Image (cartoon, helix red, strand yellow):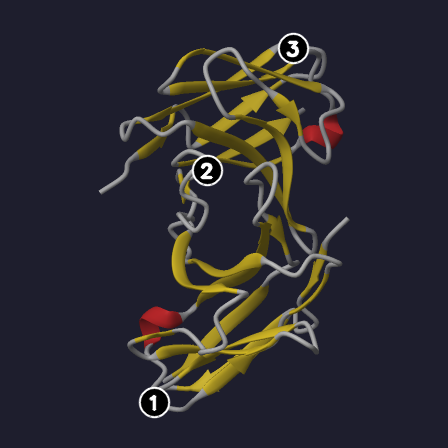
Amino acid sequence: AQTVTQSQPEMSVQEAETVTLSCTYDTSESDYYLFWYKQPPSRQMILVIRQEAYKQQNATENRFSVNFQKAAKSFSLKISDSQLGDAAMYFCAYRSRQGAQKLVFGQGTRLTINP
Amino acid sequence: DVKVTQSSRYLVKRTGEKVFLECVQDMDHENMFWYRQDPGLGLRLIYFSYDVKMKEKGDIPEGYSVSREKKERFSLILESASTNQTSMYLCASSRGTAIRNQPQHFGDGTRLSIL
C-alpha cells in the first residue's frame, strides 16, 4: 500500500519570503499522480498544484512550484513571495494511475505567515 | 465551478444514535468520496463510490456505511455513533475513471461531535 509522509507538522515564514514544504511517499508503482491541497481556516480543501509522474518537468502555478524527485520519491512544494492568504494546512496526496481514484494523504503541514 | 455541498457544518449527536451526513455535488461527477480528518493523521478514506448504487470500502470503513441512490448524492451513515467517531468529515467528488488526472473537489466539511 502507498504511504505519504509530511515530516513538518508546522512551518512559518515571513511575508514575501520563500518557504518549502516537504513530502515523501512510498510506492512500487511507476505511474501515478501527486497533488498539493491547501485547507485554509474556512476548511474547504483547494487544489494548489498537481504533477504527473511520467512528466519530468516540475509543475508550476504562479507562485507555487514543486520539486519532483521521482527516484527519491520526494515531492516538495515551494511557495515564493509568501502572502498572508497562504496561511493554511497543506496536504500532499498520492493517487495511483490504475484502479480506484482514491487519494492517499499525508499528515499535513500547518503554514503560518508572519507579517 | 464545481460545488460540493455538505448538509451540516457542525453536528452534535449522542452515543448510540444513527447519524446521517449528506453530500451533494452539482457537476455530474461519477466518483464520490467520504474522508475523515483528524489532527496528525491527515485525511483517511472511509468509503467511495464510482457509480450509482456502487460502493467500495476505503481504509477505515468500520462503523460506517454509505448510500448512493442518485448520482449527485452520497450519504455517510454512522450506524451507532460512538465517541471515537468525533471528527471532521469531508466529502469529495471527481470525474470518472477515463480522466485520471482530474482532481477531487471537496465540500466544506462537517465537524461532528459525539457526546
Q: Position of residue A113 (x, y in %)?
A: 42, 78
Kindly indicate whether the residue at mark 3 contacts the one at mark 1 (C-beta within 8 angstroms): no
Q: In what element is the residue under mark 2?
A: loop
Decide: is B84 above or below B53: below
- Residue receiving disc 1: A16
Asked whether the residues under marks 1 and 3 belong to the same chain, the reply is no
User: Are there few (<14), some (14-19), or many (20+) residues within 10 Å of tag 3?
Assistant: few
- Residue receiving disc 2: B109
Q: Position of residue B67 (x, y in %)?
A: 53, 12
The amino acid at mark 3 is Glu
Q: In what element is the residue under mark 3?
A: loop
* Closer to the camera in the image, A6 or B53: B53
Dot label at residue B17: 3
> Mark 3 falls within which chain?
B
Q: Tell which tag, 2 or 3, sits nearer the viewer.
A: 2
Left or right for B103, reference A10: left
The amino acid at mark 2 is Gly
* Closer to the camera in the image, B109 or A1: A1
Asked whether the residues under marks 2 and 1 belong to the same chain, the reply is no
